[in-house]
Amino acid sequence: MTGQMTMQNRGASRSKTRIYGTVQYFSQSVQGRVVDLSATGMALELDGPFAAAKGSRVKVQSEDLGFIEGTVQWQHQNRLGLQLKLSTNTLAQLSSYFRFFHEDVKPTLAG
């Protein structure tokens, strides 16, 4: 195969998390959880329908992270990928979370 697909991937290292919160876009609001988090973005698993096109600005509110804004990079079924709006406040919130609250999440096997 001579051609390769060019796909931009997030360069920052990712951490698996279980942060619960609410995602808002205009009048839409849906509960969900952050399943992976980095210094530049996050992936969320949503509990219900949510319609926001790529490039849309959304807000995420959670007890662990506070209030964070991001831009939709992708959406597939009930999953949503955001690029975070990096401000000094966002960086401080992420730093605080990783310093004081984050514990590595290990998958559990049902058996």
Image: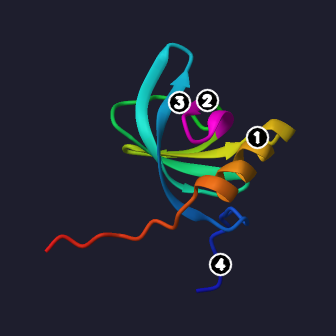
Magenta region includes residue 61: yes
Q: Is residue 55 something one can see in this rendering? A: no
Give the amino acid at mark 4.
Gly
Instruction: Determine which residue is flagged by label 2.
Output: 58
Q: Are marks 1 and 4 in contact (CB under 8 Å)?
A: no
- Residue 90: give its label: 1
Q: Which residues are magenta?
A: 59-71
Q: Residue at x 57, y 58 (%)?
A: 102
Q: Is residue 42 above or below residue 69?
A: below
Instruction: Determine which residue is flagged by label 4.
Output: 3
Alpha carbon distance from label 3 to label 4: 32 Å
Lower sequence index among marks 2 and 1: 2
SS class of the residue under badge 4?
Answer: loop
Magenta region includes residue 25: no
Mark 3 or mark 4, whichever is nearer to me? 3
Q: Residue at x 67, y 34 (%)?
A: 68
- Residue 76 in picture, x, y percent from top left: 43, 47
Image quadrant in which you'd find residue 71: top right
* Main secondary structure along the magenta-highlighted residues: strand
Q: Are marks 2 and 3 in contact (CB under 8 Å)?
A: yes
Mark 1 or mark 4, whichever is nearer to me? 1
Q: Is residue 23 left or right of residue 7?
A: left
| Label 2: how many Cα within 10 Å (few below 14, some 14–19, many 20+) | many
Alpha carbon distance from label 2 to label 1: 14 Å
- Residue 25 in picture, x, y percent from top left: 55, 23
Give the amino acid at mark 3.
Ala
